[in-house]
Image (cartoon, grey):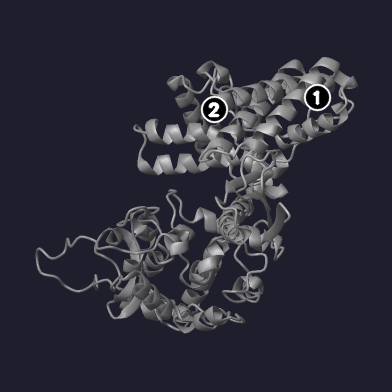
Amino acid sequence: MPSRTTESYDEVSMDLFIPPGGKTKNWYVRVYIPSDLHNAYGVRREFRQSTRTTDKVLAQARAAVFLSERAAELLQVRQAKVAMGVRRQPHPVTLNPHLTEHIAAIRLASLVGFDDEMREGQGDGDWDEHEEFIRTRLAAMKQILARRKDAKDYAAYRNEFLGEAEQYGYKLSPSDPQLDELILAMARADKRAMELMSRRSEGDSTPEDTQGIGFWLSSLLRAWADEGVAHLDKRTVSSYRARIEHFIGFVHDKPVSTIEQSDVYAWLRHLLNVEKHAPKTVKDGYLPALRALMQYSLSSGQFKLKVDPTLGVRVPRLSKAEAKRRERPRQPFPISYVNTLFSSVWYAGLNERKGLVSKIHEGGGARYWLPLIGLTQGLRPEEISQMTLLDVGMQSGVLSLQVTDEAEGQHTKNESSKRWVPVHPLLLHQGFETYVIEQREVQGIPAPEDAFLDKRPGQRAAPRRKAGRLFPELATDHARQANAFGKVFNRFIREKLRYEAEFVFYSFRHLWEDRRREAMSKAAAEGRAWPDGLQFQLSGRAKSARSEDEGSAAQYGKGFTPEAMAPYIAQLQFPSLAPPATWTEFMAR
């Protein structure tokens, strides 16, 4: 009977085998990490587990479960990488003694971390193959260190180490005069790691064995989140954590002690030039987040960090041409651009997702409704993303949407942003009310009360009930709930639809404002001018803008009811618009 068999599941391959050596007859399963995800797992290249049976049929069944679980995890990692768009290409470097030591330290920490993971949850008989690897590798490293270029496998290991350095972000020239010194340094790191692994297997390992190896950025982040955030408010912690996770993804999680100013500077440059963040956002948001993490590392004294790598680092300056280009305002979508989106794969149907790999596309709700709401209601992306099921309901007799900061995780741009607005007729035609009812039934959330009904004294401060998310797939712990959707949407229209850089999700709001102006102009010409201040309540503009229209009266009263506003929002027309399939049709495809 063969002692090895292979299968694959959704691009992830599996190897079923009996370890050599004869110490166990149980079948083992090994799932290989796809090459495009190697950077996400350090030096780890596989997941392995005993099926704890000698019956091959039963082993295959248990292996299939293990394979599907690991495949799901790996595919999620791949989707996250695509959604984040984090790419750090290896950059050419010239070796020097400091850089050589730096790369070797990463190699050592990676191997020890790999050994830590391999030992978790393993029982007797699980280590035959691993121990054989340790013995073989240790002998090879000793030979390389003793004979150098004359060693039998020197050329093979030289190519392997070059590949490893590239995974760490360093592209080395084969003709670099210091390359042989790096090969020896990495061989010494391998030898030390193999000796430590061997002592661990024999039970002779001591804490001194790992002295100087350091800790991973991901472990530092966990410690910081548990112990170093007491002085920060919840929104800041959420925002900082998201930005720190971005840095870890960019540098490919590695030992804290190996982080340098060049890593920080390269990250800031990526944020500015690749992801197109504003310099102020990078300076006042991303850099302080990483600095908070590094300051915690220094103050704790546990993570072997000697110098804060963010000290002295300044945000790179944009070229004059780039700065001037970015000053150009966002542009409203032409109707032809909106029609192109509505006829694209984005709206092809729930199950039609070729090229749409984000979690955001799975539920269909956010994917379908956010662009339509942005188009017809003119709401800001965050105002839509954070809505709950208590923010949609019949108010003063018409189906309406609420922008508020009452629920946990909600916030508004200013006080005037808080408002109820009537739902545009196009949304009703597309089936928005049907979608809301479906979500209420799934989540068990009743409709909200009419906020515009007169109430007796003592009834006005009723506590907000369980709300439920209007778009559950957008749920996040991060302060800005629209960020993930905005990145996915903007990347889609830029890469798939080839829209220019000045068109983003906010372009819906700009288009809405143009249609609002046209509706007001037409109404005024026909002697049916809009009431003063109504346009500002629909758009959620600050009271300072409303005061120019209404004078001091803008500071008084609750404003217009949705019933009063409904005839006016219905005047916003979109000539030549070709709407997508209705919600019911979309879900059926």
Residue drawn at the location 53% of the way across and 23% of the way down: 203
Q: How many marks?
A: 2
Residue drawn at the location 54% of the way across and 27% of the way down: 215
The answer to whether any part of residue 258 appears in the image is no
Mark 2 belongs to which amino acid?
Phe
Is the residue marked by circle 2 packed among few (<14), some (14-19), or many (20+) residues within 10 Å? some
Circle nearer the viewer, 2 or 1: 2
To which quarter of the image does residue 105 belong? top right
Is the residue marked by circle 1 packed among few (<14), some (14-19), or many (20+) residues within 10 Å? some
State left or right for residue 278 relative to residue 87.
left
Q: Position of residue 259 (x, y in %)?
A: 61, 27
Image quadrant holding the C terminus, namely bottom right
State left or right for residue 99 relative to residue 197.
right
To which quarter of the image does residue 458 belong? bottom left
Q: Position of residue 248 (x, y in %)?
A: 58, 38
Q: Nearer the viewer, residue 422 or 40?
A: 40
Image quadrant holding the N terminus, namely bottom right
To which quarter of the image does residue 119 belong? top right
- Give the residue at mark 2: 215
Looking at marks 2 and 1 on the same chain, the residue that comes earlier in the sequence is marked by 1
Q: Nearer the viewer, residue 450 or 122?
A: 122
- Give the residue at mark 1: 94
Spatial separation of the CA atoms under disc 2 and disc 1: 26 Å
Kind of element beneath mark 1: loop
Q: Position of residue 110 (x, y in %)?
A: 63, 31
Mark 1 belongs to which amino acid?
Thr
Q: Nearer the viewer, residue 7 or 126?
A: 126
Residue drawn at the location 37% of the way across and 60% of the way down: 546
The answer to whether any part of residue 555 appears in the image is yes
